[in-house]
Image (cartoon, rainbow, N blue to C red):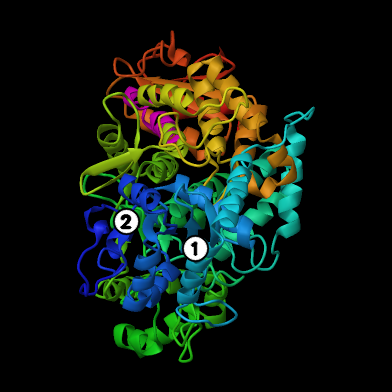
Amino acid sequence: MSDKEPTHPANRLADETSPYLLQHAHNPVDWYPWGPEALERAKAEGRPIFLSIGYSACHWCHVMERESFENPQTAALMNEHFVNIKVDREERPDLDSIYMAAVQAMTGHGGWPMSVFLTPDLKPFFGGTYYPPTDSRGMAGFPRVLTSVSKAWEDRRDEIVASADEMTEQLGAMSNVPSSGEGVLDAKLLDRASQALARTFDATHGGFGSAPKFPHPMDLRVLLRQHVRAADPYALQMVRLTLDKMARGGIYDQLGGGFARYSTDERWLAPHFEKMLYDNALLTTVYLEAYQVTRDAEYARVARETLDYILGRMTDHDGGFYSTEDADSEGVEGKFYVWSLDELNQLLGAEKAKTFAYVYDVTKAGNWEETSILHLSKTLPQAAALLGRPEAELRAELAEGRAKLLEARELRIPPGKDTKILTSWNGLMLAPLAEGSRILGEERYLDAARKAAAFLLDRMVTPDGRLLHSIRDGRAKLNAYLDDYANLIDGLTRLYEASGEPRWIESALKLTDVMIEEFLDREAGSFFYTGVNHEALIARTKELYDNATPAANSMAATALLRLGVLTSREELTDIGRAAIESVRQVMEKAPTAAGQALIALDFLLATPKEFAVVANPDDGEFRAVLETIASRFLPHKVVAPARIGVGASPEVVPLLADRPVKDGRTTIYVCERMTCQAPVVGVAGLIGAMGV
């Protein structure tokens, strides 16, 4: 985020809510937000559009702004020849998806900032990503690009329009996955996915592929399921090495918790320092599941610290969760997070600083740009042995040192924060909070999930029951996308399963009906990314491949399959199955881009274990029973909890029909396909009935 004084009058972005757009509100560029005013001007004047798409935590977006958009000469060129539109990709993922696909088709790569030139009827004809201010490193300077594109538009307009028409036809066809043919949905798809992940696995540092290295949370969850389903020890080994290395690396904030977006190297040492809400939601879920499988306390610690980071730094007073924290502070990438040996000596004293520096790799020369990123090159048991220290004593000293450094770090100028609240990313955050509350035995996480869910349902749902996508400063706006619905439905379902409070499951079902009505392509079985009431764009796309977040189509399937089992609504299961069938070829041919679909497939192929848990209103045993269920890794379970008189009605959750409390205690009915064992009471009875 920019904290500099404006040097130019405000442009049209000054009335926007997006922090990213507001960063550009005092550029000399005559920026427009995406909307009728800009689009009508381009058509009326026959001008091409320069469309710039980025986001607030994007380092190179800030660089291009400083170098080009704040340059009066460059701005003059832009204003003379183009209608200039600035878009926040997090507010308008629909636009980002369409035009990123165009840039990738034109150049073979993509990224942000995205720079794309459009005809007045919004068809792309030239594009790229970051452009330097002058010709350098084999790249054309941005002024030269502007001049060349403008001249081509004047001299070869018919040729450009024909090319843009052809590109637009290609974009319209991109959402059509080849027919699944005669293939079936079976466990072989899960086996092949595990084998594909093993082929790209880094057996030294964990993770998949080489630098830059991303965490791949959905793929790790696929491997945990493969380990349990197929008794595959290597699947668990891949997960454990990756989680261990990430938790010890610089990608994890060793002082404040939470994960950065990705590592620029293969060792997880040097992150690109921005922190995204969705990464931390998805990774918390992985660490929680790994803890369920292994009972390794380190995974519980990382999950707890990450949730505490979200609650401490990324939560609005009304309960919603902010989007991102920047990579930069004071205009310097990573400045907030790095340390010098001198700083350690001042804060900890020479002797303790020496130990802390040894463990966390802080040196005079530094490990990154002459400074040091805190990371654990050795495990703490290894460090204790090499130092000749009792491990417990060393841990206590390091904890004291981390607390002092964190206190000192809080006095630094923090990175900018994007405080808009997105329904889709907030929906992702509900599940780890709700489930984490039971797995970790922390009621405060359930309270936070309740507050966030209530905020979303109260502020992001229109009177006719439709969702909105984004809110900031009390201004909710933009029709929601498929992932807004799918992520929130899934999150509300998990919140119901953790709490037993009827509001959440009832709201999930209402939103599900809207999602099906608005987004389902009944002919193909898959879901469009935009609803039938959305603004008409040059293509109506489908999100069928995972990216940094789960594919929206796959999240819709995940939510529908769980709801279908939990509420005995066969039609939801059928729609969820069709959504998975629509991407069978993606799972077969590109399994590393289909992690969420494979998670949904794993659930579909299993026989879900159904738990009906009923209790008296004041029964304290209720929470202990839910925590016991949550302590096991049972990825195919659904839970229907209820306190007598305040639970969901049997019409909404038939699993609760005719489930009396036995002996006045919390009573558990363990079922499969609505056929139940004899009821048991309390934690001891539950453990016996679970047989695990």
- Residue 239: percent from the left, percent from the top? 63, 54
Is mark 1 in CB contact (under 8 Å) with mark 2? no
- Residue 49: percent from the left, percent from the top? 43, 57
Q: Nearer the viewer, residue 54 or 641?
A: 54
Residue at horizontal 30 percent and vertical 54 percent from the top? 18
Q: Main secondary structure of the magenta part?
A: helix
Taking the view exactly as shown, the residue that stands out farthest to the front is 155
- Residue 398 occupies quadrant: bottom left
Taking the view exactly as shown, the residue that stands out farthest to the right is 182
> What amino acid type is highlighted by mark number 1?
Glu
* Up-down relation of residue 254 to residue 369 (above or below): above
The residue where tag 2 is placed is 32
Residue at horizontal 44 percent and vertical 49 percent from the top? 281
* Up-down relation of residue 639 to residue 411 (above or below): above
Q: What element carries label 2?
A: strand
Q: What element carries label 1?
A: helix
> What amino acid type is highlighted by mark number 2?
Tyr
Q: Quadrant of the N terminus?
A: bottom left
**Mark 1 → mark 2, Cα distance in angstroms:** 23 Å
- Residue 283: percent from the left, percent from the top? 50, 52
The residue where tag 1 is placed is 154
Q: Can residue 179 be seen in this view?
A: yes
- Residue 525 occupies quadrant: top right
Q: Looking at the image, is mark 1 or mark 2 earlier in the sequence?
A: 2
Residue at horizontal 50 percent and vertical 77 percent from the top? 141
Q: Quadrant of the C terminus?
A: top right
* Up-down relation of residue 355 to residue 599 (above or below): below
Q: Nearer the viewer, residue 644 or 512?
A: 512
The span shown in magenta is 490-505
Label 2 packing within 10 angstroms: few (<14), some (14-19), many (20+) = many
